[in-house]
Amino acid sequence: MPHILIVEDETIIRSALRRLLERNQYQVSEAGSVQEAQERYSIPTFDLIVSDLRLPGAPGTELIKLGEGTPVLIMTSYASLRSAVDSMKMGAVDYIAKPFDHDEMLQAVARILRDRQEAKSAPAPAAASNSRAGNAEKVVDNANGEIGIIGSCAAMQELYSKIRKVAPTDSNVLVQGESGTGKELVARALHNLSKRAKAPLISVNCAAIPETLIESELFGHEKGAFTGASAGRAGLVEAADGGTLFLDEIGELPLEAQARLLRVLQEGEIRRVGSVQSQKVDVRLIAATHRDLKTLAKTGQFREDLYYRLHVIALKLPALRERGSDVIEIAQSFLVRQYTRMGREPLHFAHDAEQAIRHYPWPGNVRELENAIERAVILCEGAEISADLLGIDIELDDLDDEDFGLPTVAGQSSGNSHEPTEDLSLEDYFQHFVLEHQDHMTETELARKLGISRKCLWERRQRLGIPRRKSGVTSGP
């Protein structure tokens, strides 16, 4: 069980964080200051330190040195976010803004501990340093490696190929995909496989920072630039100098900030808020969005010139419902990770759980799947996870043993006028498939291909208004 040290002077926050981590099967110790932590514990023995930045006495960044390699996650308020960037330069592994979301904290902790474990078990760097191409292959072949991308469907294979080509360049990249598909994982892969891998990767969620602060957070400010600016501060773009800046949900960026960002891309320089001086920066930009930036640009909600600057390389992350059998591979990976983290004996999915995972459309994508697996592991009392523990809304009564087989069936109708598109819902897919094949398949064959019973096929025909056509094919009694 991973052992985590919390260093936080506010008792309420410290206690709440301790309860959160203990509920998720972590061993937790706590202290109210760096001095108290030194007196009570051997700091290097912890697996992770979660510390407030501002503490009585020494700041939380002192734990970076005292931990002797133990990763330190810094907690900070928005008002001191720039100080957190400074702490990352000093060696903090990441920072998280207060007040933090519980899921966000748990994801950060799990990711840091996973990276630490993988770093311990990784081979010596000498062999790997000779070939970026060798590292790039890990994106495809090493599903649980440092890249963290799982899946082998055709769409993901195409994505991996593009990552291998794009990563070594300095081109700007726009990652598109629905919420929860893992756009930040693509950004990390691009950074880790680039020549900037040893420099910082600064991740910013544009939707999470208040609009009144976004410009000073990104570009910094001079002393006196606005009320409360008692000292000059570097911004996040400056902190990413020499490395990679990842702007998640860039569609939420205000137009004024977009103009400043465009200057960074065009001129390679920034100007802090309240300053008349510009300074050069060397930053590779990776942006991500679930919105249609082209449409936003046409309606004046996003700068068209910035859109074309970002759209040098566009990578599309498919939704989980479009990835076929990848969903089971990802679910199995999450299952192993969760029961291992919680110190449980190995668990497995019951047949109905596998059916539910395959057939459910997962509107929240990989993030929703991960949360469902975590919930199931927590609630499971035996060695088998049943469908009801997943907490998803799906009827399993009419499902046969066979899968829907979406990739195979869709491939059979390739080039046909009724070929389903990647954006179809399962209901749309059902309608397309039936219309495409009912003239040369019996009802039994149709039902078997769709992975449902004949009774269910008949009921869906009635509900969707798809009458059985009279043809030469007989379906039997």
Image (cartoon, rainbow, N blue to C red):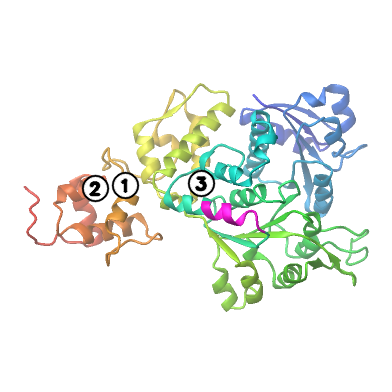
Would you call the spot at circle 1 few (<14 residues within 10 Å), some (14-19), or many (20 or more)? some
Residue placed most toward the observer, 154 or 102:
154
Residue 287 lies, with reference to residue 96, above or below; the image says below
* Residue 119, position as x, y percentages in the image: 67, 33
Q: Disc 1 marks which residue?
A: 405
For marks 1 and 2, the one nearer the N-term is 1
Per the model, the C-alpha gap separating discs 1 and 2 is 8 Å
Residue placed most toward the observer, 140 or 435:
140
Q: Quadrant of residue 327?
A: top left
* Residue 256, position as x, y percentages in the image: 74, 72
User: Does 68 sit left or right of 131 as displayed?
Assistant: right
Judging from the image, what secondary structure is the residue with disc 1 in? loop
Q: Amino acid at mark 3?
A: Val
Viewer can see residue 182: yes
Q: Are marks 1 and 3 in contact (CB under 8 Å)?
A: no
* Residue 446, position as x, y percentages in the image: 20, 51
Q: Disc 2 marks which residue?
A: 449
Q: Disc 3 marks which residue?
A: 366
